[in-house]
Amino acid sequence: MLKLKFINRKNIYLSLLLVFLIMAGVIIIDRYVTIKGNQYVITPENLSQAQAAIVLGAYVLPDGTPCQMLRDRIKTAVELYNNKKVQKIIMTGDHGTQDYDEVNYMRIYAEKLGVPTEDIFMDHAGFSTYDSMYRAKEIFLVNSAVVITQAFHLPRAVYTARALGIQATGVKADKHQYAYADYYDFREIPARIKAFSQLHLLHSKPRFLGESIPVTGDGRLTHDKFKS
């Protein structure tokens, strides 16, 4: 009976130790990705010129209107384009079905703000931040970029881009107060752990790759059915 109690107590201690180590690992990785990514988040005034702005997709309403977060990302990219901080804009997001399309409506919104259509590239298979950055490097042959998204998302996005070989900086697109801000902050913790694992442990591939379309060329090569 005493031996059984000792074994049970030992198992409890080992379980608690394992939980502690897992929690410590999560905290360390989360902080590491956040700190390293934030080192390259800067203000537009301090940017050097880059090949492209990479605009990360977000929800598009059924009528084709980008949500507020996404509109702010596009506007920020257009401002950088107009100020000669970037030469091209890559719209990357989810266009996995005919019924849901982020990137065409992102392009159309930017065109309405005055960006020439040939300077807008579309990544139709940017199903995640990791996929978007991997494809920016491998498909669009991006060497230098400014990543455009909200502050909660930027550290992971920039960290991912740089780990994949892009000389990336990040610019915040926070032009408004957004609903569910606490939820987005909390969601980033597992997302940062996943990104670290994809980059350094799993060496993951994106869902789709394909032939190269250099960002130095004409963005219309990536366009499909929609007109502005």
Image (tube, rainbow, N blue to C red):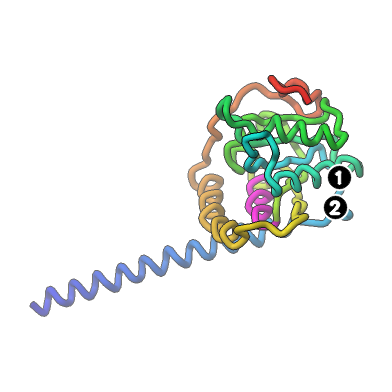
Q: Nearer the viewer, residue 73 or 32?
A: 73
| Residue at point 63%, 31% (across, down) | 101
| Circle 2 residue | 44
Residue 110: image x %, image y %? 80, 36
Instruction: Say which quadrant the C terminus sits in.
Output: top right
Q: Which residues are magenta?
A: 151-161
Q: Which mark is residue 108?
A: none
- Number of residues whose C-alpha sits closer than 10 Å to that of mark 1, classed few (under 14), some (14–19) or many (20 or more): some
**Rendering quarter of residue 134:** top right
The question of residue 9 being in magenta is answered with no
Q: Return the x and y of residue 222 as percentages of the image width and height.
A: 71, 23
Check whether the beta carbons of the residues at disc 2 and disc 1 lie within 8 A of each other. Answer: yes
Local crowd size for mark 2, using a 10 Å CA cut-off: few (<14), some (14–19), many (≥20):
some
Q: Residue at x 59, y 27 (%)?
A: 209
Residue extending furthest toward the bottom? 2
Q: Say which residue appears at 65% left-offset and 53% top-offset.
A: 153
Q: Amino acid at mark 1?
A: Glu
Dividing the picture into quadrants, the one containing residue 58 is top right
Q: Among all residues in the image, which is located at the extreme right?
A: 83
Q: Is residue 193 left or right of residue 212?
A: left
User: Mark 2: which amino acid?
Assistant: Pro
Question: In this view of the protein, can residue 84 be seen by the observer?
Answer: yes
Q: Secondary structure at mark 1?
A: helix
Q: Dominant secondary structure of the magenta stretch?
A: helix
Residue 161, position in %: x, y? 67, 45
Helix, strand or loop under label 2: helix
Q: Is residue 197 above or below residue 28?
A: above
Q: CA distance from mark 2 to mark 1?
A: 9 Å
Residue 13 picture location, percent across and down: 29, 73
Q: Which residue carries the number 1 mark?
A: 79
- Does residue 188 appear left or right of residue 83 in this picture? left
